[in-house]
Image (cartoon, rainbow, N blue to C red):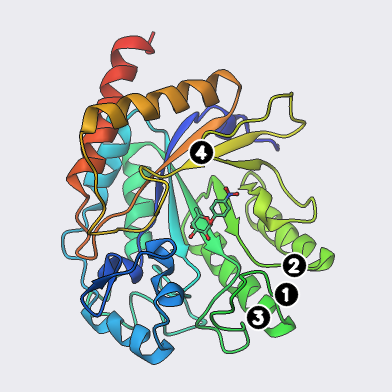
Amino acid sequence: QKPSQRWIDQKFSMFIHFGLYSVYGGVYNGEPVRRGYSEQIQSFAGIFSDWYASTAQEFNPVKWDPDEIVKLAKDAGMRSIVFTSKHHDGFCMYHSRHTDFNIVDATPYKRDLMKELAEACRRGGIDFSVYYSLIDWNFPQAYPISSHNADPLTEEHYRFNLNQVEEIMTNYGDISEIWFDMGSLTLSQSQGLYELVSRLQPQCMISGRLGNDWVDFAVMADNEYPDYKLGVPWQTAASIFPETWGYRSWQERGEVQPKVEEKIASLVKVISRGGNYLLNIGPRGDGSVVEFERDVLLGIGKWIKVNAEA
Ligand code: JFZ
């Protein structure tokens, strides 16, 4: 069953970084935070956990429209969406039973946004996948905001992750891949998570970041690709600008067309070497898609229609 041929055939997918950090948009106390990725603003701006958590009361993404997102992905020529179920801040974009720090219980929005996206993908005929951070700055035993993101998971934190991965793998239909990120795991922790996912969803492709060789595909950074034939399927993940994945309000974006050409070149390079290209968008805190990012995606889709579709 694995590697999933369906996954290998996706070729081009949408990554979405959307979470509580999107409300900040890379700004804290009225100042742009220039260090680090904007999705990690809590860490890079040194925001106290209780202050950061209280931002949830302002998180009301009423402009988020999952069917529009799916339409954008399809117009771009993408065949799946990988969504941040939980990033390092620990905020869950789905209704978790294992913490209140989630979009249903902690925000005025009160809706399971991830479930609505999964359903929109299904309606639109594209695959749905999740990103899941193994580190969690909101979890009491998780060494919150360590200067290095690689502290080992305690037994209790590991159990918490297992519980959350179980609910994600159970309540959101078919999941094409799970993009585990960061965190140092022992051999048996990597194996435990791998076996849990495989038991619940045998077809689900598991990302290289789970570690200890318990992986189904390797992950490369943008403009990286293996220069020899890998023994495993692989994917290249890229953001529109390398400085951030989450929304950054003060990003200098420039012209759309050169960016379209840059990303088409990456896409062609990756696909022609047998990889999958995963290109990110970072919606605003109100749920709207940044026009520049939308236009880049539509530009790529137009090129694919003219040049690559049989
Ligand atoms: C990780 C996260 O820390 C980051 O916030 C974002 O979610 C990104 C997609 O994943 O950061 C990485 C980790 C490794 C690489 C790039 C970004 N890498 O190997 O090139």
The mark that comes first in sequence, 3 or 1, is 1
Do tag 2 and tag 1 residues touch (Cβ < 8 Å)?
yes
The residue beneath circle 3 is: 157
Question: What is the crowding at mark 3: few (fewer than 14 residues within 10 Å), some, or many (at least 20)?
Answer: some
Q: Earlier in the sequence, mark 1 or mark 4?
A: 1
Check disc 4 and report the residue beneath it: 222
Give the amino acid at mark 2: Leu
> Which amino acid type is marked by label 4?
Asp
Q: Quadrant of the N terminus?
A: top right
Judge: label 2 CB < 8 Å from ligand 1.
Answer: no
Asked if marks 1 and 4 touch (Cβ < 8 Å), the reply is no
Which corner quadrant of the image does residue 166 belong to?
bottom right
Residue type beneath disc 1: Pro
Residue shown at 36% from the left, 45% from the top = 241
Tag 1 secondary structure:
loop
Q: Secondary structure at mark 2?
A: loop
Q: CA distance from mark 3 to mark 1?
A: 10 Å
Q: Secondary structure at mark 3?
A: helix
Amino acid of disc 3: His
Quick one: SS at disc 4?
A: loop
> Observer-nearest residue: 43 or 3?
43
Who's the residue at 73% across and 34% down the image? 232
Name the residue tied to disc 2: 185
> 185 left or right of 222?
right
Label 1 CA crowd tier, 10 Å (few <14, some 14–19, many 20+): some
Which quarter of the image is occupied by the C terminus?
top left
